[in-house]
Image: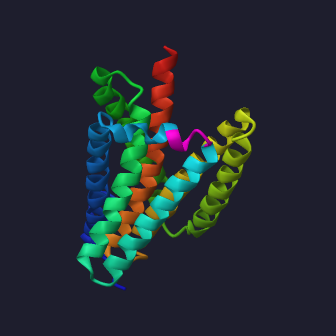
Amino acid sequence: MSYETATDRGFLLSGRDWKVIGTAAALMALNVLVMYVVAVTPLAAVNDYLFAIPILGAVVYGAAIYAGESIAARGIEGGNVGLALAGVAVLQGAFGVFGAGVLSVVPADSRALVLGVAAVVTAAMTALIGGYVYARAGTTFEHYGKWSTYAFLGGLGGVLVGSFFTPVLLVGFVLIMLGFLLRLGWEMWRVRDGRVQAVSLQAVGLYVAVAGVFVHVLQIVVRMLAER
């Protein structure tokens, strides 16, 4: 594995880092567009059926994200472009349909604004986490990966209990969002230290983390708008 020297770096980021982050950002931008388009289609109603039993929705989307990322990774590592694109398509579909379902309750003329606010908040959170990770050069954030897994498992447990006792759903929401935030820190650490050789593979991992944070921020923005 090769590492770039300090002379290859821009503002805290190497040329390779910019490629990873730029690719992830492009995937996220595409996903936001998918959400906007799908919100006006019958697919936007999928959430209504899946989350009639919250744990069912959480498991279905969780499985789709895991499957999409696994397929994309297998394609990238094996040099199979078609398989890699298929995996990314599954991820775009999973996050896109979920986000569209959240967005569908917002008046059509406000959807672009809501997506824009969620995007700005998510970008700010990503910059803060990334800045923290890069500022602590030489510090390992490997434990963030384990903490993220624990948060996801705790979140699923909260959603399971919340499926029968609604107030606990908030605990599940917070833990799953925390899981994606920790995953984001872990992914930024891997980008910083160049721990994955393939730029595209690392970009997909970073995109999944950012998309997970984005859909949670989107839910918060929509809820705040509904309460106004």
From the top left corner, tell me how far across and down residue 179 is, in percent.
58, 54
The answer to whether 189 appears left or right of 172 in the picture is: left
Could you tell me residue 135's position as x and y percent?
A: 47, 57
Residue sitting at x 41%, y 53%: 94
Q: Nearer the viewer, residue 196 or 72?
A: 72
Q: Nearer the viewer, residue 189 or 14?
A: 189
**198 sits to left or right of 50:** left
As rendered, which of 48 and 79 lies closer to the eye?
A: 48
Image coords of residue 47 (percent x, y): 48, 40
Q: Is residue 123 visible?
A: yes
Does 168 appear above or below 17? above
Indicate the quadrant where residue 17 lies: bottom left
Query: Looking at the image, which residue is at 69% across and 53% down?
Result: 154
Q: Position of residue 100 (x, y in %)?
A: 37, 39
Does 59 appear in magenta?
A: no
Q: Which residues are magenta?
A: 49-53
In the rendered image, the quadrant that contains the N terminus is bottom left
